[in-house]
Amino acid sequence: MHINKRAECTIESGRNLQIKPHPNLSQASILEERIVVAPTGVSTGIALTAFNAIKIGFLSDLPSGTSLASFLDPVILALEDAVNEGRLTRAVELLPLHVTGLPAGSASNVRAAYRHLVEQGCVLILSTGLTDNSLVLRDLVNESKVPFMSMCGTTRFTGPYCFTLANGGHGEEMAIIAAYCASKGYRRVVVTGERSPGDTEYQAFFREQARLYGLDILKEHYFDQRPNDEDMDTAMRQIRDLGPDAVVYAGFGWNSAMFNPSFKRIDWDPPKVMSAAFMWALRGHELQVALDGWIGIEQTIGEQDDAEPNPNLVAARRRAKERFGYVDQETVFALLYDQGRSAVEAIANAPILTGEGMALGLERIKMMPCTLGGPRTYIEFGDYNHRGYKGDFLFLKQLRDHVFYLEAFHWPQWKSNRES
């Protein structure tokens, strides 16, 4: 048991918890320990018997299941902070589950995992929520009436029970990238990436934004699957020989690490701009090397950036250091902390603690503080308004020698205003 001021948790940290295969679900895993956060003075044992804990699911659908436990500390911190503030007065049980969904697994795996969490009594399910898997779940979520909080960037994850705190945003990212290319004089560009439902949306948005900013798309080349080196080099030579001003990567990132090695083999070093797939480089050294030199979409301002940071992120990371003994510099820390605080507000606002009530509780969130993005980012939901981040929650950074440096903010402005 860990005591954090007025909050108590059944575990010290989620980071080192053991996972085990799920006994009934294909390509799924769960934790060996139970996670309950509750106010002190009412033990979690009492809370679970006399006052049933509110069950919140967490569905991890990233290609690797090894990181399931490490996702949980920001959510635990958010719940404990809310208890310490007096905002959360009930016990909450987290039910984490990892499933291998698309693109490495199957759609049926994802549906089965969501159904399982609903059957366990969850009234809200938080998630990493990749776009393809979120689209797979959309109709099931709306039929089940248990809200699902996704990080997906698609605009098509819609319905009364579909909510997003997005790790990117397909339309917004393409608007930022198109504006950036125009500002740098990169008028003749090529677009590449993968061919999937989410990536198709990326690419359609970029075509529209390219027209708005006067860009000429010389060629679009999308891969159906991971190519071998020979096929990759052939495609890149064809692109190089067109003489583009820049290469734009608009996709999930399944093939993103293959481009720099190919550019080196064909002796070409073009300006290169990437969607939020750029943030895969936050996951470790190998991807940082593979994406070095790219400019891409990111969502947190670091100490190395010459820009005003989000004070909520600075403070949350300080508390995380005190609570867990380490500082998580990845953007996913902010995304997950914000999901945890949104869950608390849903509980506080819900007229009844059911899936339907939690959806109504989320829709009552207005200008809620958040840790992601710049200092003017906030979270807000409403009727038919289920994409939560508002404000400066996306910007461009460049990766150089394992460090991400702020490259540009995007300030939306009509051409007439820029020229006046």
Image (cartoon, helix red, strand yellow):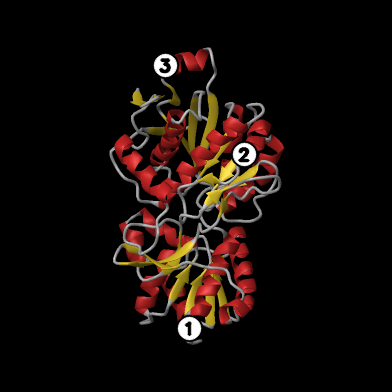
Q: Where is residue 290 in the image (x, y as percent from the top left)?
A: 36, 65
Q: Considering depth in this image, is 345 or 274 the residue closer to the camera? A: 345
Q: Which amino acid does label 3 sit on?
A: Gly
Q: Nearer the viewer, mark 3 or mark 1?
A: 3
State the residue at coordinates (50%, 74%): 180
The residue under label 3 is: 41
* Residue 101 x/y as whole percent: 53, 47
Q: Quadrant of residue 298?
A: bottom left
**Foreground pick, 378 / 152:** 378
> Disc 1 on helix, strand or loop?
loop
Tell me whether circle 3 and circle 1 mark residues in contact (CB < 8 Å).
no
Q: Distance between the residues labelled 2 and 3?
A: 28 Å
Residue 245 bears which disc, if any? 1
- Judge whether residue 223 can be spotted in this image: no
Helix, strand or loop at label 3? It is loop
User: How would you rate the neighbour count of disc 3 (Cα within 10 Å): few for under 14, some for 14-19, many for 20 or more?
Assistant: few
Q: For the residue marked with disc 2, what is the amino acid?
A: Leu
Which image quarter holds the C terminus? bottom right
Instruction: Determine which of the numbered discs, if any, sits on residue 362 in the image.
Output: 2
Q: Does label 2 or label 1 sit earlier along the sequence?
A: 1
Task: Look at discs 2 and 1 and give the one toward the viewer.
Answer: 2
